[in-house]
Image (cartoon, rainbow, N blue to C red):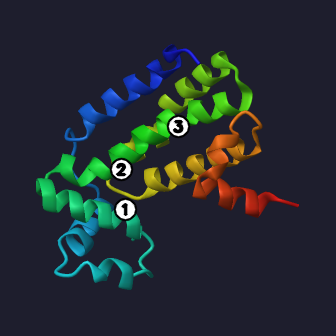
Amino acid sequence: MKSWWFLPVVVAALWCGARVTQRGFEYDELWTLEHYARAESVSVIFEDLTVPNNHPLHSLLVRWSVNLFGGSEWATRLPALLAGVLMLGLIPAVVWWWTADGKLAWLTGLLSALNPALLHFAQTARGYSLQALAVVAFAGAVVLSRSEEHTSELQSPCNLVCRLLLEK
């Protein structure tokens, strides 16, 4: 696949990265920062699962990021930004694996890179971009597990699980 299909993803990543510090925290970001990232014990993240906006893996990643880089906007939003950028890059790759159509992969990358919800959550310290990345990664694993071209990838644990779940 030609590398030009990644251009929309790169532009979206640069745009999200530049905007990560241009606005204040939202309520849910502050909740994650104060109740999970700055909590005395990491166990609070995994004990308080009834709160709707506690995304445990994301809260843990925010905690690590804040501990490493401080509580600034960019450090707090870094896990979501990385997950969002990876997801935006993985979407056209999955389309390519599925269809082998470079134009369709590029168009999908462009539409994803212009999607307001994907862009917003890639620059907001909430768990939605990480969840979306997991869904896209699972879709990619399913596509690869069904592909005869990618038989070597079938040895990976994720593809093995996909094959076990999808076998008739």
The mark that comes first in sequence, 1 or 2, is 1
The image quadrant of residue 32 is: bottom left
Residue at position x 53%, y 24% from top? 110
Residue at position x 30%, y 61% from top? 61
Residue 58 is tagged as 1
Using a 10 Å C-alpha cutoff, classify the residue at mark 1 as few (fewer than 14 neighbours), some (14 to 19) or many (20 or more): many
**From what the image shows, is residue 109 above or below residue 120?**
above
Residue at position x 42%, y 43% from top? 84
Residue named by callout 3: 90
Residue at position x 27%, y 50% from top? 77
Q: Is residue 14 left or right of residue 33?
A: right
Using a 10 Å C-alpha cutoff, classify the residue at mark 2 as few (fewer than 14 neighbours), some (14 to 19) or many (20 or more): many
**From what the image shows, is residue 98 above or below residue 106?**
below
Q: Are marks 1 and 2 in contact (CB under 8 Å)?
A: yes
Provide residue 27's location: percent of width, then percent of height: 29, 62
Residue 14 seen in this snapshot: yes
Disc 3 marks a residue whose amino acid type is Leu
Residue named by callout 2: 80
Whole-Å distance between the Cαs marked 1 and 2?
A: 8 Å
Regarding mark 2 in the picture, which secondary structure is present there? helix
Provide residue 103's location: percent of width, then percent of height: 65, 16
Provide residue 42's location: percent of width, then percent of height: 25, 78
Whole-Å distance between the Cαs marked 3 and 1?
A: 19 Å
Quadrant including the C terminus: bottom right
The image quadrant of residue 15 is: top left
